[in-house]
Image (spheres, grey):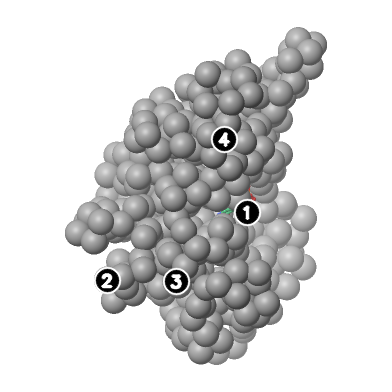
Amino acid sequence: MIPFAKPIIGQEEIEAVKRVLESGMLAEGNVSRELEKQYAKYTGTKFATVTTNGTTALSTALEAMDIQPGDEVITSPFTFIASANTIAMIGAVPIFVDVKPDSYNIDPDLIEDAITDKTRAIMPVHIFGMPAEMKHIMEIADSHDLQVIEDACQAHGAEVEGKKVGSIGHVAAFSFYATKNMMTGEGGMITTDNEDLYDEILMVKNHGRGKQGGYSHYRIGYNNRMLDIVSALGIEQLKRLPESVKQRRQNAQEFNDFLSEFDVIRPQVEDKGLKSSYHLYAPRIFSDKMNRDELVTSLRNEGVGSRAVYALPCHKQDTYLNIHQWRWAKFVNYPNYSKLSLPVSEEIGQKHFDIPIHPSLSTEDKEQIENAFCKILG
Ligand SMILES: Cc1ncc(COP(=O)(O)O)c(C=O)c1O
């Protein structure tokens, strides 16, 4: 089976981790500072700080932005559930706004209608590595005095008009989970240009400690610190990222060209000015003869590691259908998510599937994938 992800771990990664182990300094320290410096440079942001994973990157940023219980945060329903959960975790209310049919990303034209006097922030998600329409989203946010937190957990290296994602919103979160374009097994990063927010983020992620360290604490915080062992891996992975994104984009172009032969398959569309980093390559099937699940099974029978990742968008997940059981429900009014109809994300949920796109795909792998489509779809 051609796997949907294949992390590249070379001798460089092994040596880097070994050096940290041999140094005996395992916790967040100088190696993490170096990764942060290099990541900030890569994304074109002033500040970056490591966290334990993408989830804590998002929740740390939301807390540092002082999002309060009952505040509303607008986000996409077509995402990994962590995006919404980090909002709900702190007592805020995820407000799901439908996505656009071709990009699968939040529809800026629908955001305005969802804004109320409780709205505090917008969390666009760059889904599968495809950047959301940040220019439009920032204009809406500016005109309503809202904060924007980019969920860039899947989008290392993606760009909007030449700017890397993570440098456009007020703050952004990245995940370094094992299957991501840049990975450390588990890990995360927050980027921002705002120094006050950065200072607050450092406190939230480290038990409210001030910059000077020591045992004076200034606010409630967590331990969302990263290990230097993990950051060492990150530094080596970051070196591979530009080439990896280039290769993913090349593979995507090849698949786009090939799949355009099939009327029933439509890829995720990259609008002008946007550059996806293709964490996943996820087209949709529109056929009377074969549904998505049958296609995924057939592809898997041909040795292609295909899946349908978000068959259920967030508002259709039990977590949100049963939100009245969540501890904050005593204090916060949630919408009745079961009454929510978000037809575009629901349709993409039914029709999308992904196929391997990672940079380790060989010419033979790509041929095998293409032959599988020919065999299945005729
Ligand atoms: C869109 C999105 N947001 C948030 C996360 C959370 O990241 P992590 O798994 O590192 O906690 C992920 C992880 O896959 C994600 O895909």
Instruction: Look at the picture and state if 340 lies above or below 197.
Output: below
Q: Badge 2: how crowded within 10 Å, few (<14), some, or many (20+)? A: some
Q: Nearer the viewer, residue 114 or 110?
A: 114
Amino acid type assigned to the residue bearing label 1 in the image: Pro
Looking at marks 2 and 4 on the same chain, the residue that comes earlier in the sequence is marked by 2
Disc 1: which residue = 356
Determine the CA span between mark 1 and mark 2: 36 Å
Q: Nearer the viewer, residue 3 or 373?
A: 3
Determine the CA span between mark 1 and mark 3: 32 Å
Residue at image location 45% in from the left, 55% down from the top: 67
Determine the CA span between mark 4 and mark 1: 42 Å
Answer whether residue 168 is visible to the viewer in this image.
yes
Looking at marks 1 and 3 on the same chain, the residue that comes earlier in the sequence is marked by 3
**What secondary structure is marked by label 4?**
loop
Amino acid type assigned to the residue bearing label 3 in the image: Ile
Looking at marks 3 and 2 on the same chain, the residue that comes earlier in the sequence is marked by 3
Looking at marks 4 and 3 on the same chain, the residue that comes earlier in the sequence is marked by 3
Disc 2: which residue = 112
Label 4 near label 2: C-beta < 8 Å? no
Disc 4: which residue = 208
Label 3 near label 4: C-beta < 8 Å? no
